[in-house]
Amino acid sequence: MPKTPEIKVEERIYIGKGVRDKVSLIKSRLAFESLTEVARAQLPIAISKIIKSNEKKYVDFFNNASSLNIRMHMLEMLPGIGKKHLKAILDAREEKPFESFSDISSRVALLQDPVKLLTDRAMMELRGESRFYILTRPAHQQAPR
């Protein structure tokens, strides 16, 4: 009987096409409700690390986010961003595009931690608490049995 590979918390594993060293079969994406309590507790930490390790991509999100419709901007989807914060972010990026998370924090008053905003938003989307998905893809809904 083949030995089951050990997967550690926050370990990156390859699940794409071709040869995989630890995962042999992928049945479907897991919904947030299907995760264990330990996995749910570790998820914000892992998301935060992913965001920090892809800083340019997420800073570009702040630089390039646009309106969703005539009443709502993508940046307003981030928890704690209202009309005043939105105006401050748009004004600051108009002067000069943001270069880093620390640049965003220093140039936008009262916006202390962009990583936390993005992490909180990703968690909302993963829990299925939003109509719009700006950072993640929705989990496929399975038909009731």
Image (cartoon, rainbow, N blue to C red):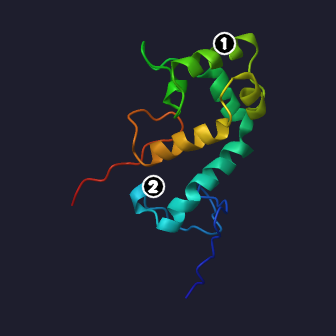
Residue 77 x, y percent position in the rendering: 49, 30
Q: Going from the N terminus, do you reach mark 1 or mark 2 first? A: 2
Q: Residue at x 74, y 11 (%)?
A: 95
Residue at 63% in and 28% down? 61
Q: Residue drawn at (69%, 23%), measured in percent from left and top?
A: 108
The label number, if any, that marks residue 35 in the structure image: none
**Rendered image: mark on residue 29:** 2
What number of labels is visible? 2
Q: For the residue marked with disc 2, what is the amino acid? A: Arg
Residue 104 in picture, x, y percent from top left:
72, 27
Q: Is residue 128 above or below residue 92?
A: below
Give x and y (percent) for residue 23. Answer: 57, 67
Give the side of residue 65 with respect to residue 112, left or right.
Answer: left
Residues 102 and 13: in front is 102
Residue under label 1: 91
Q: Indicate the position of residue 93 as horizontal and vertical percent values.
A: 70, 16
**Could you say whether the residue bearing mark 1 is in a helix, strand or loop?**
helix
Q: In the rendered view of the protein, which quadrant contains the C terminus?
A: bottom left
Up the image or down, 100 lies above or below 37; here it is above
Three-letter amino acid code at disc 1?
A: Asp
